[in-house]
Image (spheres, rainbow, N blue to C red):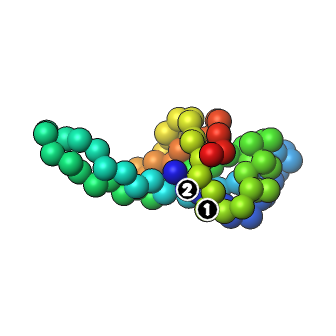
């Protein structure tokens, strides 16, 4: 996956936050056929991980893991809350 980072900001409590987007393109096997998959999804990181990502050049390849959660209480849009990022 590639990532595009935005500007690092801080919560009122002083915790670093970075919102960014992840892009993924691959070909997957489904029902005996090949299916091209393209995904662009919002993601967010907090703390030292946010600071580390803010220093990395946008567009770099990463492997991200974390959990999905709604953007807000009333939103149906999912955001990946990144807990680990491995730079490739």
Residue displayed at 53% across by 44% down:
80
Q: Nearer the viewer, residue 32 or 45?
A: 32
Residue 73, label in figure: none
**Distance between the Cα atoms at labels 2 and 1?**
5 Å
| In the image: residue 17, left or right of residue 73 | right
Residue 2, label in figure: 2
Count every numbered label the image shows and give the total: 2
Q: Is residue 79 visible?
A: yes
Residue 77 drawn at (x, y percent): 43, 52
Residue marked by disc 1:
59
Q: Nearer the viewer, residue 86 or 69?
A: 86
Q: Is residue 42 visible?
A: no
Residue displayed at 56% across by 36% down:
65
Residue 41 drawn at (x, y percent): 48, 55
Residue 52 drawn at (x, y percent): 78, 48
Residue displayed at 45% across by 58% down:
40
Q: Secondary structure at mark 1?
A: loop
Q: Nearer the viewer, residue 60 or 72?
A: 60
Query: Is there a contact, CB below 8 Å, between mark 2 and mark 1?
Result: yes
Residue 27 drawn at (x, y percent): 31, 50
Circle 1 packing at 10 Å, graded few (<14), some (14-19), many (20+), is: some
Circle 2 packing at 10 Å, graded few (<14), some (14-19), many (20+), is: some
Q: Is 73 rendered above or below residue 40?
A: above
């Amino acid at each position: 996956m590639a990532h595009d980072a935005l500007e690092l900001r801080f919560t009122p409590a002083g915790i670093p936050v970075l919102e960014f987007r992840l892009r993924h393109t691959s070909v997957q096997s489904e029902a005996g056929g090949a299916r091209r998959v393209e995904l662009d999804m919002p993601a967010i990181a907090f703390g030292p991980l946010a600071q580390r990502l803010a220093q990395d050049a946008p567009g770099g390849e990463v492997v991200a893991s974390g959990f999905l959660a709604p953007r807000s209480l009333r939103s149906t849009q999912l955001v990946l809350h990144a807990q680990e990022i491995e730079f490739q």
